[in-house]
Image: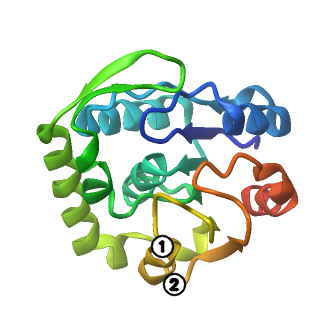
Amino acid sequence: MSEKILFIHGFASVGHGVKSLQLKQWFGNDVFAPDLNHRPLTDLNDLSALIKKEQITTIVGSSLGGFYGLLLAMQFPVKLVLINPALQSPHTLQKYIGTVARYNGEQFTWSQQQVDELSSLLKQFAISKDQQLDQSKILILLSKQDEVLDYQIAIDTLPNANIIVDEFEDHRFADIGKYRQQIETFIKR
């Protein structure tokens, strides 16, 4: 059976970016990378529908997409690759309330309602993660030089996951290629 991979981008990013293109090079056309609407509950519903429709076997999530990936992995039997997951997203994204420009120049509105939705999701995650999340099915790539997030939070939250800490990458973690072998081995196991 071939792997079907869902890539979930981070805040203010787009599905068609460096990391999703790398994944498509490695895994072919079975990589799905939709643009999020930046409405957390709607995005999670849309992603859930895509997982069911395409029978996704692995989720790769970057930053906010990593947080969404964790939430989805509590519902679906998938492997999970997290890249600098935003496990404190309500706090981190509070400062962006207003009009935000995506990396492609498009703009969207980020409001207190979206931050409140993330807060509610984070509470749900904290309550049920230990019962509903198999950490052995999680690979985390973290950056010591992450200027946005404290990488230690992910280690403390998911101590039994497979964790790689990079000494040099920043929050974007643009070069996941240097971990291609570990990613491919983890996904194909």
Please indicate whether residue 125 sits to the left or right of residue 69 in the image.
left
Task: Quadrant for the C terminus, please.
Answer: bottom right
144 and 161: which one is in front? 144
Question: Would you call the spot at circle 1 few (<14 residues within 10 Å), some (14-19), or many (20 or more)?
Answer: many
Q: Which mark is residue 109?
A: none
Please indicate whether residue 177 sits to the left or right of residue 120 in the image.
right
Query: In the rendered structure, are the residues bearing label 1 and label 2 in contact, judged by CB atoms less than 8 Å apart?
Result: no
Mark 2: which amino acid?
Pro
Task: Locate residue 140: give its quadrant.
Answer: bottom right
Q: Marks 1/2: CA distance?
A: 8 Å
Disc 2 designates what residue? 159
Q: Could you tell me if residue 140 is visible in this image?
A: no
Please indicate whether residue 186 sits to the left or right of residue 10 in the image.
right
65 and 46: which one is in front? 65
- Examine the rendered structure and indicate whether residue 105 appears above or below residue 121: above
Q: How is the image coloured?
A: rainbow
Disc 1 designates what residue? 154
Secondary element under disc 2, as helix, strand or loop, is loop
Residue 186 place in picture, x, y as percent: 75, 63
Q: Which residue occupies 76% across, 41% down? A: 2
Mark 1: which amino acid?
Ala
89 and 186: which one is in front? 89
- Examine the rendered structure and indicate whether residue 16 appears above or below residue 6: above
Q: Which residue occupies 58% across, 39% down? A: 7
Residue 173 place in picture, x, y as percent: 66, 52
Q: Nearer the viewer, mark 1 or mark 2?
A: 1
Q: Which residue occupies 74% across, 65% down? A: 168
Q: Which residue occupies 48% across, 25% down? A: 35
- Examine the rendered structure and indicate whether residue 106 appears above or below residue 67: above
Q: Could you tell me if residue 85 is visible in this image?
A: yes
